[in-house]
Image (cartoon, rainbow, N blue to C red):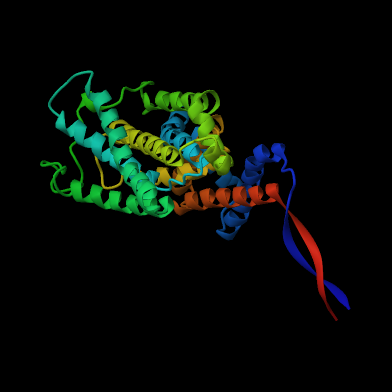
Amino acid sequence: MLPRLIPRLEKRQTPSKAMIYLSPLLAIFLTLISSVVLFLIMNVSPLEALHAFFIKPISTIYGLTELAVKATPLVLIGVALSLGFRAGVWNIGAEGQLILGGIFGGATALFFYEKTGFYIIPLILIAGVVGGMLWAGIVAFLRTKFNANEILTSLMLSYVASLLLNLLIHGPLKDPDGFNFPESRLFSDSALLPILYDGTRLHIGAIIALLAVGLGWILLSRTLLGYQIKVTGDAPAAGEYAGFSHSKIIWITLLLSGGVAGLAGAIEVSGPIGQLLPTISPGYGFTAIIVAYVGRLHPVGVLFAGLLLALTYLGGETAQISLKLPIAVTGVFQGLLLFFLLASDVLIHYRIQFGKQGAIA
């Protein structure tokens, strides 16, 4: 008779602080190992595929600037989402808030189509922030007034935002001279973000993203609001005892994350896109959730995580062209990374124990 070993999770008394920050590196390593297996299954040389994904896209100056362009919305949204996640407010609808920001910013650019002036770009960016905040405000209202789950409401509103964009781009905002194609006019030069490096698409949005990282770090570590956010997320009972308003934190974090996501949307339409299209994001709002967690919900960590996830977008495009791989491989990379990160987090707080139960002959 042999004892039957049953695996179970046992909570650790003191989770390793070092592993909390090393787990993203472990997740990246496991993702690379899994990707090798994936490429072998697809009959593609793993070395060629990994080179196409992670080396070739940044082997030139133009490639490095494209990395910054792709990382800009991911870092912006990731920093804002990390603040909400630290407070236990789960805004999963940043994609919809980005789209609303793009709609508001794009509509502002089209309104000033025949005008020039330095004030147009600031108005576009402000309009984007307002659009994102309005969309996130719906989620905050439903959460605080009716206790509706913000995960569901924010996620469903993302699809509403996408349909609204399609409605507008096929109707009031469609280019009258565009031969009935579903797209707006190309924005005037006064509505396009200034380029930082000639011959590339690198724009001032990258600087705004860096400022967001700095401001996010200051807010979390040097302000009373940051302290309230951390206490509310880590110890809700203690926050309530200290007199911190949970409803206030919900409103602030949702409006902040929605506004920044809207800003990212306005930056996208007035930067690399230059007009309104039926699709203005390849899923930046959803990918930013992975960015926030890979960055350990810390603004500086989000910066590096944003660059990493931006590289997967560039690498997916390069592999599609050079190796004929499907663009969906990018999503597989991102999904594997999140899976292994969450698995690593479980093992940070729990250990696997094998207990004896029953017996087998």
Q: In this view, does 133 lie above or below 9?
A: above
The residue closer to the viewer here, 358 or 326, is 358
Residue in the picture at 64% in, 47% down: 345
Residue in the picture at 75% in, 57% down: 352
Residue in the picture at 31% in, 22% down: 194
Quadrant (top left, top right, bottom left, bottom right) of the C terminus: bottom right
Residue in the picture at 19% in, 19% down: 117
Q: Seen in the image, is 220 located left or right of residue 134?
A: right
Q: Seen in the image, is 174 located left or right of residue 192?
A: left
The answer to whether residue 60 shows anywhere in this view is no
Q: Which residue lies furthest to the left in this view?
A: 176
Residue 183, percent from left and from top: 20, 44
Residue 153, percent from left and from top: 37, 53
The answer to whether residue 263 shows anywhere in this view is yes
Quadrant (top left, top right, bottom left, bottom right) of the N terminus: bottom right
Image quarter of residue 177: top left
The residue closer to the viewer here, 131 or 73, is 131
Q: Residue furthest top?
A: 118
